Amino acid sequence: MLKGGKASKKSSVTAMNLIYRLMKYPGSNLLVVRAVMNTHRDSTFAQLCWAQERLGVSGFWRNTVSPMEMTYLPTGQKILFRGFDDVLKLASTTVSRGALNFVWIEEAFEIGDESDFDKLDLSVPRGSLPDGLFKQTTLTFNPWSKEHWLKKRFFDQKTPGVQVFSTNYLCNEFLDKTDRRVFEQMKENNPRKYAVAGLGEWGVEEGLVFDNWQVDPNPHYLTDKTNWRAFFGLDYGYTNDPTAFIAFYANPVKKEIYIFDEFCQTGMLNSVIAQTIIRKGYAKERIRADCAEPKSNEDLRRYGLSRIMPSAKGRDSVLNGIARIREYRIFVHPCCRQTIAELSGYVYSQKVNERGQRLPQDRDNHLMDALRYAFEDVRLFKGNMTMPNEKNQNALLGGWDVCG
């Protein structure tokens, strides 16, 4: 079990370690798992390619993306990639040569259901091994919430055969001064976020604005398409603050929302914002945007987003919006990493309004603002409707550019 903050080299070292082990132990094979299969290419696959290059052994490996696998050419040993979005198929994974004795579960925090992990753990690796080989499952993750089952199962108690480690950016020799400066500024400006994202400590629930959320790769609406509808929010930024866009489904009957798409970055011109939203397939959707920028809203309409609507701002609009959202259970697709980060660090400040109500900190909350804008439309939706956009449904099924 290896938990760590951002840039703590847990994935880099794990990738190098596994490449080294496979080459050291003939007959061994590796299964690499993430919550969603289509997230491997730009994460674990790229990381293992980097590790081969870093170790100077790229010439001994053949790496393909269709099918996604890596082959150690001298012996035919394999690295296979799978997702928890098909647990039964995952559990039946086998290799034709040697033994499937190593497993790497990357971003294990994304696995919301402990029973899914159990299904894998009971089936892979399995069977007796030739002399000289051993079995090991490695889990790497960011400790976003202390309520996650990983903490209760592996860190709160000693489990035979389990070793736990924590790491952070301070021991990462791959970082330069610019990288480290980001964390030093975080330490000064947002100590709570620094404790989790910087030092790799477990996320603290006390003071969180939203404490009723969890990461879940399984879209809940698939079992019942009624009473769900898609909603979209947009918060503007440019130089210091990012532009933030969020997309989610809401069910007012079950009081649940499922956040499935996002983008959040600085330096986006209005034309680029519009192009990004159109590329994602939301050109015809109603989008609630920050009412403080009517010029930007008008620009986006001219660029093809005809249903941009200004949000309502006024006295207590922030607290009222938060109160509406807190009535719902929040599920987040693991690809929405910036949303997960904001939910983990969005806390109340010591400031209060004239009625003594605590106010949230006004930092690192751009996606949360976009979520709050979109909830103005949720309160008008009473249910008994199906999804309005078939393409958006396909997004959750992994057949489309989610969080691209």
Image (cartoon, rainbow, N blue to C red):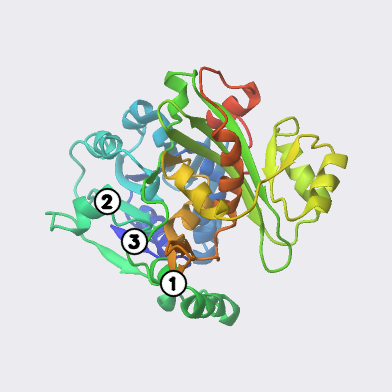
Vertical comparison of 251 with 355: above or below: above
Looking at the picture, how far across and down is residue 393, in whole percent?
Answer: 58, 25
Question: In front here: 399 or 285?
Answer: 285
Question: Residue reaching furthest right?
Answer: 302
Q: Which residue is mark 2?
A: 150
Question: Residue 331, percent across and down?
Answer: 43, 40
Q: Amino acid at mark 2?
A: Leu
The count of marks equals 3
Q: Amino acid at mark 1?
A: Tyr
Across and down, in percent, residue 40 comes to 51, 44
For image coordinates 25% across by 55% down, the residue present is: 151
Mark 3 nearby-residue class (10 Å; few <14, some 14–19, many ≥20): many
Query: Which of labels 1 and 2 is toward the front?
Result: 1
Marks 1 and 2, Cα distance to the nearest angstrom?
Answer: 21 Å
Look at the image and tell me in which quarter the N terminus lies.
bottom left
Quadrant in the picture for residue 97: top left
Count neighbours of disc 1 (C-alpha within 10 A) and say few if under 14, some if 14 to 19, many if 20 or more.
many
Contact flag, marks 1 and 2 (Cβ < 8 Å): no
Contact? badges 3 and 2 (CB < 8 Å): yes
Question: Can you give x and y, in whole percent of width and height, for residue 168 in the image?
Answer: 39, 71
Q: Residue at x 69, y 51 (%)?
A: 290
Instruction: Name the mark on residue 194.
Output: 1
